């Protein structure tokens, strides 16, 4: 059991905090686990038009098979990849159209990757018939898990010749039904109407559209698109629906939630905060990766807070992603402390003291070619008032970086905050990134400790403008606000981030940091899992798809001895950010997107209702034992 004290629940209020006098937990060695990959279904056009000659030699079908073989050879062993084809069972005459428009065959399910079986299935494809894209998407969707994120990668050389159902309408239908399927489409030598149809189905689901003019380009593009479909951002949480007006907003307890955020649309959520408590609220969206003409750049996510009667509490946070089409995750968050302020002065009571507050998120600035809507992931944390804030900050400057000894320990980063790979503390860790990936790791820092790190991108031996990529790294607090970040251009030779001498680092974590003059230092006032994100954007030219993956090394330094933290007036199971363990909060009667057990300690608390059941159970057990003793 951790040295964090035993916990009890203020179930009726759902207040989360640490028990008075609790000592910090010591980070444990995380259990080893397989990386999480989104189950992915390849949907391959095998209509009669695929018999046409490819400019590079052979038929278009030959080129498509080569592209699939290349992807299969490079796909991670832990991935789940299936294969669906259309057009193989009939000819393309008018008399065969009725049958041809139902001609969709699943050759392999989205099961643990069997490279030999998948390659054999691809080799046996013979193109003949029609192009029922809409029907193929429906069948592919039925073969994917009903819950959780998954992907479809479609390769087509033309329009659906069988609609209805129209492919874009199928994409909208599946999204409306709650499927978390991201569709990526590759147009293989297509005309403008076909490109528009394929782009629509991709954008509707937050996926990507990519042109492949010939077989050589397809062979470069398909492995990259498929690889990014596998290690995508994995949202998780309880499904809720924010409202346009604050009065109708759903009330959220401490926990993690999912919603859908359309362009330039504000969504409101209510949180009840006890007097003296501190609330933490963040929203995260992940952008799909895009190439070429589909690039979109500047996107902004804003956060506002309102009090009673919709009073503007003058809390405004805004974060911007300048290279959204690299597939970045954009997070905005706030530490709301006004519930700890006295209700004095005219109108002050509406934005001070305990009560119901409203958090409003908006995708305010939208880049060109951006998807119509994005999945929104929210975290709510509630921290109790303290009776003793603990020692004052020993320093408010970032901790020094201490170079860890080798050798490097291999790890596999996760595709989101939720499946971020836990690193057990100071050390040297190695991973391999595909171009276009944005991966996450997490490192625990206790009261009194600080975290510093560097990222080293290895030498691939490839040089030239075609191989230039944008690389970046960001350090986040346990409630996902940004501590620091850095970015630079990667040319294929060894590159270190940050690009200056210092490392990205926190200050020593102490409760009283929240009183510091520097805003960023104030946010470093709770212990827990700090997140490291590492990005390797797609290269500037399609040829980079043929280059070897890029090796990276994480140099991680956790300094300082764990020390006693503050004394809280109230506590609950899990801690304000899940630092005591436990899954994401679950609301009775709502749909929850499952997070993998391999995520370890999640950044949020158990639901108060679940904890209440445990408390009641404990009371009943005590009563039963006493009665037994009297007998």
Image (cartoon, helix red, strand yellow):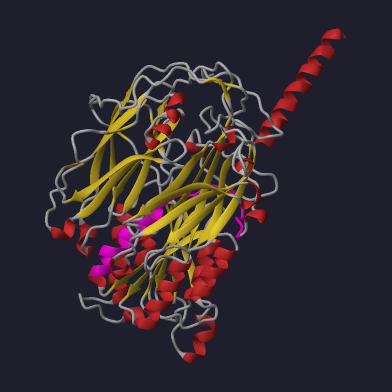
The residue range painted magenta reads 217-244
The quarter of the image holding the C terminus is top right
User: Which one is nearer the viewer's eye here, 456 or 561?
Assistant: 561
Looking at the image, residue 622 sits to the left or right of residue 547; the answer is: right
Where residue 227 appears, as percent x and y from the top left, is 34, 55
Q: Residue 384: x and y, percent? A: 59, 28
What residue appears at the point 43 percent right and 65 percent down from the top-left corner? 371
- Point 61% across, 25% down: residue: 571
Residue ID at (62%, 43%): 346
- Residue shown at 51% from the left, 69% from the top: 171
- Which residue is outermost to the right? 631
Is residue 259 located in the magenta-colored stretch of the structure?
no
Q: Image quadrant of residue 617?
A: top right
Residue 114 visible in the picture: no
Q: How many marks?
A: 0
Could you say which is closer to the camera, residue 96 or residue 379?
A: 379
Q: Nearer the viewer, residue 398 or 97?
A: 398
Q: Is residue 607 visible?
A: yes
* Residue 168 x, y percent position in the rendering: 49, 74
Q: Is residue 241 magenta?
A: yes
């Amino acid at each position: 059991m951790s040295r964090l004290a035993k916990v009890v629940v203020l179930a009726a209020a759902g207040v989360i905090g640490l028990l008075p006098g609790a000592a910090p937990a010591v980070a444990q060695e995380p259990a080893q686990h397989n990386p999480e990959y989104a189950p992915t279904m390849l949907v391959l056009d095998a209509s009669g038009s695929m018999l046409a000659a490819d400019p590079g030699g052979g038929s278009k079908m030959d080129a498509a098979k080569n592209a699939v073989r290349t992807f299969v050879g490079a796909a991670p062993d832990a991935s789940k990849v299936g294969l669906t084809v259309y057009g193989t069972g009939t000819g393309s005459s008018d008399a065969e159209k009725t049958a041809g428009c139902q001609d969709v065959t699943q050759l392999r399910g989205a099961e643990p990757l069997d490279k030999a079986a998948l390659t054999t299935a691809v080799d046996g494809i013979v193109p003949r018939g029609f192009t029922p894209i809409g029907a193929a998407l429906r069948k592919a969707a039925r073969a994917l898990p009903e819950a959780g994120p998954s992907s479809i990668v479609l390769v087509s050389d033309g329009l659906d010749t069988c609609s209805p159902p129209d492919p874009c309408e199928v994409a909208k239908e599946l999204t409306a039904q709650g499927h978390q399927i991201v569709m990526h489409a590759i147009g293989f030598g297509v005309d403008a109407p076909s490109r528009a149809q394929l782009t629509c189905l991709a954008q509707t689901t937050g996926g990507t559209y990519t042109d492949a003019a010939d077989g050589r380009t397809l062979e470069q593009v398909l492995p990259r698109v498929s690889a990014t479909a596998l290690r995508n951002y994995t949202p998780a949480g309880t499904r809720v629906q924010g409202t346009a007006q604050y009065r109708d907003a759903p009330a959220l307890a401490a926990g993690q939630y999912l919603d859908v955020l359309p362009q330039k649309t504000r969504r409101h959520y209510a949180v009840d905060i006890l007097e003296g408590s501190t609330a933490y609220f963040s929203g995260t969206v992940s952008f799909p990766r895009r190439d070429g003409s589909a690039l979109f750049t500047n996107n902004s996510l804003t956060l506002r807070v309102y009090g009673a009667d919709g009073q503007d509490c003058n809390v405004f946070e805004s974060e911007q992603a300048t290279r959204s089409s690299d597939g970045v995750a954009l997070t905005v968050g706030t530490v709301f402390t006004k519930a700890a302020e006295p209700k004095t002065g005219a109108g002050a009571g509406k934005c001070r003291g305990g009560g119901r507050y409203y958090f409003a998120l908006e995708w305010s600035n939208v880049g060109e070619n951006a998807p119509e809507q994005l999945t929104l992931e929210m975290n709510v944390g509630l921290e109790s008032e303290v009776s003793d804030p603990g020692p004052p900050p020993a320093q408010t400057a970032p901790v020094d970086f201490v170079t860890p000894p080798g050798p490097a320990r291999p790890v596999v980063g996760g595709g989101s905050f939720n499946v971020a790979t836990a690193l057990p503390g100071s050390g040297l860790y190695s991973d391999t990134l595909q171009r276009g990936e944005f991966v996450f790791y997490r490192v625990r820092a206790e009261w009194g400790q600080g975290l510093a790190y560097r990222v080293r991108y290895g030498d691939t031996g490839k040089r030239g403008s075609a191989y230039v990529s944008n690389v970046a790294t960001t350090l986040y607090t346990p409630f996902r606000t940004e501590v620091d970040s850095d970015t630079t251009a990667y040319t294929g030779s060894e590159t270190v981030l940050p690009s200056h001498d210092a490392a990205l680092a926190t200050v020593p974590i102490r409760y009283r940091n929240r009183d510091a003059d520097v805003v960023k230092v104030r946010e470093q006032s709770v212990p827990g899992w700090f997140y490291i994100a590492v990005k390797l954007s797609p290269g500037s030219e399609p040829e980079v798809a043929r280059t070897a993956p890029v090796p990276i090394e994480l140099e991680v330094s956790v300094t300082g001895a764990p020390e006693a933290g503050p004394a809280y007036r109230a506590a609950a199971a899990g801690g304000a950010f899940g630092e005591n363990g436990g899954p994401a909060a679950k609301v009775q009667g709502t749909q929850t997107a499952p997070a993998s057990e391999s995520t370890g300690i999640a950044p949020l608390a158990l639901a108060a209702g679940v904890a209440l059941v445990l408390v009641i159970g404990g009371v009943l057990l005590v009563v039963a034992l006493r009665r037994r003793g009297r007998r």
